[in-house]
Image: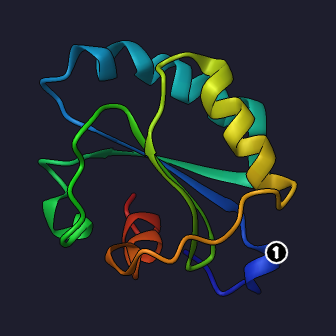
Amino acid sequence: MSNLPEADAPLLVACLCAAWCRTCDDYRATFEALAREFGNRTRFVWVDIEDEEDALGTVDVVDFPTLLIARGEQARFFGPVMPQPHAARQLVQRALEDELGALTDAALNGLPARLGALP
């Protein structure tokens, strides 16, 4: 992601989707609007799970859209969301306010850095 101290680093919001998923197609505009809404406090990254298979490592995405929200190396949310703007908006806002606890799932180790390094 960056060399900023973790507390100062932009919040990573990664949407994990697939090119063949019609729900993801519809959700992309919502995701891009949320990226504009939250501005420089966040970094939104669209991840096609088939194109970026190596970045996912052993993480298995079973439902779409799936969001990863992380501050630095610490995942704060990982899971599917309803494809409406308010669902992601609320999660991002709670993460920005430090209301989401750290996840301890070992499968997520390194995932924020790998996804944050994507263009």
Q: Which residue is mark 1?
A: 8
Please say if 69 is above or below 9. above
Determine whether the residue tagged by mark 1 lies in a helix, strand or loop: helix
Residue 117: % across, % down: 42, 70
Residue 45: % across, % down: 46, 48
Q: Amino acid at mark 1?
A: Asp
Residue at 55% in and 70% down: 103
Residue at 51% in and 77% down: 104
Out of 22 and 51, give the one closest to the viewer: 22
Residue at 30% in and 16% down: 23
Which quadrant of the structure image shows residue 84? top right
Which quadrant of the structure image shows residue 118? bottom left
Query: Is the residue marked by circle 1 packed among few (<14), some (14-19), or many (20+) residues within 10 Å?
Result: few
Residue 100: % across, % down: 72, 58
Position of residue 102 in the picture relative to residue 96 (left or right): left
Residue 7: % across, % down: 81, 77
Residue at 65% in and 87% down: 3
